[in-house]
Image (cartoon, grey):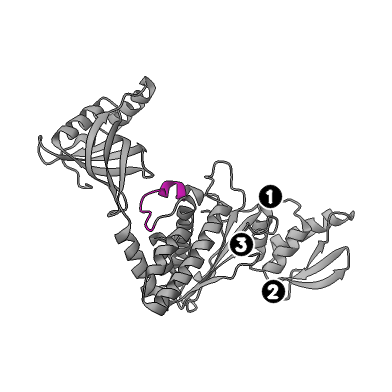
């Protein structure tokens, strides 16, 4: 997730520019009917923009150029957000966090970073929900979800109270398909379901509604992000504005109501998150992986290995305890530069990073080029066969 940089000049659709100005509180102050309108910022002083009603008149391009120049020079806080939204049609996700006015600069910086970190965690939960439903994702799908956040642009978080993130409706081709609008839709749906489930829990004392909310994208990662944002504040609000050039996606309101959470919601959110971790079942898998680290207490007996997963699960690495025979097979495959196949159960405890009951290790033949690449990796990491490592 990046912060916006200066964008190249282009001529936007006047109707889109007008919609964005109105969205950000700019006031229409008249103009010449049928030709152009005059806009001023919410503060009511300083910048004045003349926006044509369309491209039909000879001076329309000049008026748009002058309007963009005025926006670039404007001191209005919303000017930069409008320019970013014009450059690349984006849905906007906005956070409001109610906190006291920061006194010292260090306090303001801490509040800004807390808001950014919480917003990113919430976006990551939305990206995970866009890829699949689970009460607790752990390490599963995380690499793909984090890649979905790369095209996003984050605005300033002045004072740690407000933040806007721009999500391109059509992310770059290299981005995963679950980025862009699917991410925003999944996050909004999950937030609404979390709000409803929290209300039900507070009214009845039952967390059953959180079970059904999983199908709407609610998960431990989402409740954890909400707790981080709400804690230490008087409450938060999250709102979505669809890109004017694209309109709302099917099944969503044109102007969705913001979703609010308060400190009174924290017990329900914490309880739901703990329940999601506790109840998420283990997953039987058969992995194809390369051995990247080995450790055991003595030359014989069982040992622990770390595996880099190639196929079979949506995680990048797992650890497993192998019996003596399987450990020996894994060691020979590692020395030969070969991947292995292994069966077991991914356990939610530890975030699906551990393979329980690992068994049936078998080396897998690969072509010469892949074997050479694996051997090169081995020679660059000769310490992998150490008998003990502090990080295990």
Marks 3 & 2, CB-CB < 8 Å contact: no
- Residue 248 against residue 110 in the figure, above or below: above
Q: CA distance from mark 1 to mark 3?
A: 32 Å
| Labels 3 and 2: the sequence-earlier one | 2
Residue 329 or 40: which is nearer the viewer?
329
Question: Counting other residues with Cα less than 10 Å from the Cα at mark 2, is it few (<14), some (14-19), or many (20 or more)?
Answer: some
Question: Counting other residues with Cα less than 10 Å from the Cα at mark 3, is it few (<14), some (14-19), or many (20 or more)?
Answer: few
Name the secondary structure under disc 2.
loop
Residue behind mark 2: 42
The picture quadrant where one finds residue 302 is: top left
Question: Counting other residues with Cα less than 10 Å from the Cα at mark 1, is it few (<14), some (14-19), or many (20 or more)?
Answer: few
Residue behind mark 3: 252
- Residue 32 against residue 184 in the figure, above or below: below
Residue at 68% over, 49% down: 8
Residue at 38% over, 61% down: 220
| Labels 1 and 3: the sequence-earlier one | 1
**Viewer-nearest of discs 3 and 2:** 3
Return the x and y of residue 127 as percentages of the image width and height: 48, 53
Q: Which residues are magenta?
A: 135-145
Residue 109's disc number: none
- Residue 97 against residue 330 in the figure, above or below: below
**Viewer-nearest of discs 2 and 1:** 2
């Amino acid at each position: 997730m990046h912060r916006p940089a200066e964008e190249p000049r282009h001529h936007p659709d006047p109707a889109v520019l007008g919609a964005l100005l109105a969205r950000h509180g700019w006031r229409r102050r008249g103009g010449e009917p049928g030709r152009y309108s005059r806009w001023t910022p919410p503060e009511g002083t300083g910048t004045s923009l003349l926006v044509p009603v369309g491209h039909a008149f000879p001076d329309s391009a000049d008026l748009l150029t002058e309007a963009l120049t005025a926006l670039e020079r404007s001191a209005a806080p919303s000017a930069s957000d409008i320019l970013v939204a014009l450059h690349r049609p984006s849905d906007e996700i906005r956070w409001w966090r109610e906190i006291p006015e920061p006194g010292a600069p260090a306090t303001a910086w801490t509040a800004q970073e807390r808001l950014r970190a919480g917003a990113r965690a919430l976006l990551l939960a939305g990206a995970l929900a866009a890829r699949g439903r689970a009460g607790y994702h752990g390490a599963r799908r995380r690499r793909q979800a984090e890649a979905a956040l790369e095209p996003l642009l984050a605005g300033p978080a002045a004072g740690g109270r407000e933040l806007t993130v721009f999500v391109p409706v059509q992310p770059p081709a290299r981005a995963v398909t679950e980025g862009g609008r699917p991410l925003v839709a999944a996050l909004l749906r999950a937030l609404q379901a979390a709000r409803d489930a929290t209300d039900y829990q507070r009214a009845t004392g039952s967390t059953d509604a959180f079970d059904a909310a999983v199908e709407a994208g609610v998960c431990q990662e989402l409740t954890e992000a909400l707790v981080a944002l709400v804690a230490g504040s008087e409450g938060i609000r999250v709102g979505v504005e669809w890109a004017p050039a694209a309109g709302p996606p099917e099944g969503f309101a044109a102007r969705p109501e913001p979703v609010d959470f308060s400190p009174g919601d924290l017990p329900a959110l914490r309880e739901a998150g703990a329940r999601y971790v506790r109840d998420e079942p283990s997953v039987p898998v058969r992995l194809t992986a390369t051995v990247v680290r080995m450790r055991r207490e003595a030359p014989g007996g069982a040992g622990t290995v770390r595996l880099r997963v190639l196929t079979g699960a949506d995680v990048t690495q797992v650890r497993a305890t192998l019996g003596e025979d399987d450990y020996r097979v894994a060691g020979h495959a590692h020395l030969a530069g070969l991947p292995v196949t292994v069966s077991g159960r991914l356990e939610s405890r530890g975030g699906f990073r551990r393979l329980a009951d690992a068994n049936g290790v078998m080396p897998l033949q690969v072509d010469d080029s892949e074997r050479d690449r694996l051997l090169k990796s081995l020679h660059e990491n000769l310490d992998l066969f150490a008998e003990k490592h502090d990080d295990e």
